[in-house]
Image (tube, rainbow, N blue to C red):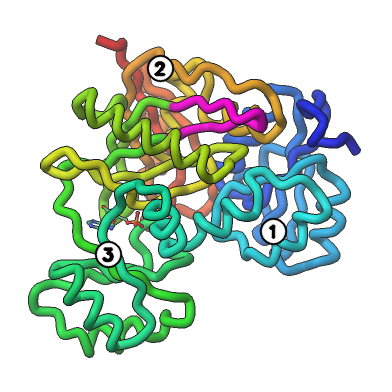
């Protein structure tokens, strides 16, 4: 097998992908365009990513025999979601180059470590406190004020594992509700009455070069991303601040790959980091249809050791997620000739499940 460390992977090399969701699918399509093969590893059969590659392992993340064979069969390993058990990554790391490296995953899969990392880097985040007991919950709420938000430090996404503590919430009742998750770990966060939620995606190559996509604004429905509007309607000052934070964090993480930084813009134009995802991100899907280089191509370039491409935005865009049954009539979107439909090949349209998206592009004004 080719050594990933020595320059770029040659065409025909195999990129191992942990996780088989839509992010893996769109990354595998970008890899194919560059002449690479993707080998998807995930526990679910017929995953969206495996549907577009010829190589897939369907096995649990703790199956060491399957993992060892996977490491043998690929030239580099990356991942398309951050809730991969850390033990899986530790098992693979001595066997095959891993990009981004294990430390990036260790930080980004835990909200508390993420916030501690930002604080150490003097990057502003929401106020926060670790909560491991009923006493610490009381102390955290006293420190942060009400309302505040209680979250599990890990395995929470799209608002799962979150409790809003309002002016009248009984802390004993809240603790009774969440204490089952205390072994995963809990974090209390100051509630931000934000003006806007934005995100910035930055890529960093093996040579330390960084390329950044324009900040975008994100609108959620029931904590799930609904729509991304490009570019974000923020001042140049806010945009510069957000880009500066993203560039800085990518460097500080010693990242090789892609990281999406979700941020709150407050009413007085402060920019606070909410969370980081060291992989392509839902708020970057518009880049497929509106940028010189998509986030998926950029991700593959970084992981493969190729030079990064231009992230230049060629058009304005609105990306609409298709959740659950919304995807059933999705082809109607194509009645607008400037709409681009992307479906992820998921058979079952469960409520809130990300089934696809539509990007509509408009000329830049
Ligand atoms: P998360 O899983 O942390 O991205 O949270 C999902 C959504 O909940 C965010 O996109 C926000 O809309 C909202 N949210 C999370 N944390 C806070 C916070 N500290 N203050 C206000 N809203 C929040």
| Residue annotated with mark 2 | 313
- Picture quarter with ligand 1: bottom left
Residue 298 left/right relative to 336: right
Question: Which labelled disc corresponds to residue 89?
Answer: 1
Residue 64 magenta-highlighted: no
Q: State the separation of the CA atoms marked 1 and 2.
A: 34 Å
- Magenta stretch in the rendered image: 201-212
* x and y, in percent, of residue 126 in the image: 27, 56
* x and y, in percent, of residue 13 in the image: 82, 32
| Tally of numbered discs | 3
Element on which disc 2 rests: loop
- In the displayed structure, would residue 336 be above or below residue 183? above
| Residue annotated with mark 3 | 189
**Ligand 1: does it lie within 8 Å of the C-beta at label 3?**
yes
* x and y, in percent, of residue 217 in the image: 28, 35
Residue 360 left/right relative to 53: left
Report the quarter where the N terminus lies.
top right
Point out the frontmost of discs 2 and 3.
3
Residue 10 left/right relative to 134: right
């Amino acid at each position: 097998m080719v050594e990933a460390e020595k320059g770029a992977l040659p065409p025909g090399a195999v990129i191992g992908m942990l996780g088989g969701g839509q992010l893996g699918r769109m990354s595998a399509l970008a890899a194919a365009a560059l002449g690479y093969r993707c080998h998807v590893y995930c526990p679910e059969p017929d995953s969206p990513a495996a549907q577009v590659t010829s190589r897939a392992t369907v096995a649990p993340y703790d199956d060491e025999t399957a993992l060892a064979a996977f490491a043998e069969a690929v030239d580099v390993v990356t991942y398309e979601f951050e809730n991969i058990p850390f033990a899986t990554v530790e098992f693979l790391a001595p066997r095959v180059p891993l990009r981004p490296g294990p430390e990036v995953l260790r930080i980004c899969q835990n909200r508390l470590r993420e916030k501690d990392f930002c604080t150490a880097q003097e990057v502003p985040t929401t106020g926060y406190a670790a909560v491991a007991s009923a006493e610490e919950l009381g102390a955290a709420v006293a420190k942060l004020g009400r309302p505040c938000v209680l979250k599990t430090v890990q395995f929470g996404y799209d608002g799962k594992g979150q409790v809003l503590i309002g002016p009248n919430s009984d802390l004993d009742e809240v603790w009774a509700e969440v204490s089952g998750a205390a072994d995963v770990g809990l974090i209390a966060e100051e509630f931000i009455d934000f003006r806007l939620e934005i995100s910035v995606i930055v890529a960093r190559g093996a040579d330390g070069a960084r390329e950044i996509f324009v900040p975008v604004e994100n609108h959620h429905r029931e904590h799930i991303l609904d729509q991304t509007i490009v570019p974000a309607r923020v001042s140049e000052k806010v945009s510069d601040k957000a880009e500066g934070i993203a560039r800085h964090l990518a460097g500080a993480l010693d990242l090789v790959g892609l990281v999406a930084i979700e941020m709150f813009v407050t009413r007085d134009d402060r920019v606070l980091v909410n969370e980081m995802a060291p992989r392509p991100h839902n708020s970057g899907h518009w880049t497929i249809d509106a940028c010189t280089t998509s986030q998926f191509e950029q991700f593959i370039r970084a992981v493969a050791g190729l030079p990064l491409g231009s992230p230049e935005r060629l058009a304005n865009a609105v990306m609409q997620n298709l959740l659950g049954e919304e995807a059933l009539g999705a082809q109607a979107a194509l009645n607008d000739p400037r709409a681009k439909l992307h479906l992820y090949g998921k058979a079952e349209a469960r409520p809130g499940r990300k089934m696809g998206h539509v990007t509509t592009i408009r000329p830049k004004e």
